[in-house]
Image: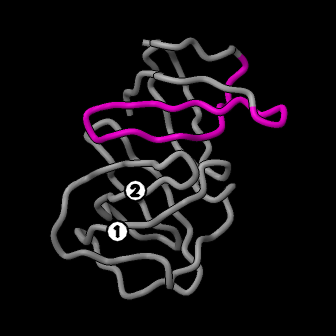
Amino acid sequence: MNVYLTRIEEVNGITMVTAENDLGNVRGVWHYDKAPVKGGKYMVEFNFNNNEPIDGSTVEVLKNGCENISTDGKVNVFTAETEDIDEIYYLRLSADGLSMLDIKDPPAINIGDFLRFMVECVKTGIYPYYEI
């Protein structure tokens, strides 16, 4: 997913970034060898909850919706379409953004459903794979 960085800060030795795109904004932990550049544009992937399963009781299943990301600076809210299910959930955040989510005790979810879930910013990984 393409994003541009609007804020960079060091918090307890961790680089936290805030990124934006047409879907909204997100704040998370920067995972890349190179330091982030404010205003820089990157193709990124996300990981959720430090790659630990999220609690299924916190996942909202929507039959209709649209992809969205938002943050209040402490918690990110993601809304994404379920593209595939294979022990984990493949979520389409945008045409160029596919992420995987592991859910403990998931509710009934079908391909095509939209999932809305929350992840603490410090447990949201932002992994750029190249600068645009």
Q: Is residue 14 magenta?
A: yes
Contact flag, marks 2 and 1 (Cβ < 8 Å): yes
Q: Position of residue 74 (x, y in %)?
A: 58, 51
Which residue in the protein does label 1 denote?
Answer: 115
| Badge 1 density bin: few <14, some 14–19, many ≥20, Cα 10 Å | many
In the displayed structure, 85 sits above or below 30; it is below
Which mark's residue is nearer the viewer, 2 or 1? 2
Q: Earlier in the sequence, mark 2 or mark 1?
A: 2
Q: Position of residue 91 (x, y in %)?
A: 38, 57
Quadrant containing the C terminus in the rendered view:
top left
Real-space Cα separation, disc 2 to disc 1, in angstroms: 8 Å
What residue type is disc 1 on? Answer: Leu
Magenta highlight range: 11-33
Q: Position of residue 121 (x, y in %)?
A: 60, 49
| Badge 2 density bin: few <14, some 14–19, many ≥20, Cα 10 Å | many
Q: Quadrant of residue 53?
A: bottom right
Q: Is residue 128 magenta?
A: no
Which residue in the protein does label 2 denote?
Answer: 78
Q: Residue furthest left?
A: 64
Q: Which residue is pictured at 36% across the width and 87% down the height?
A: 108
- Disc 2 secondary structure class: strand
In the displayed structure, 108 sits above or below 132; it is below
Q: Which residue is pictured at 55% across the width and 87% down the height?
A: 105
Q: Residue furthest right?
A: 13
Number of the label disc, if any, that sits on residue 62: none
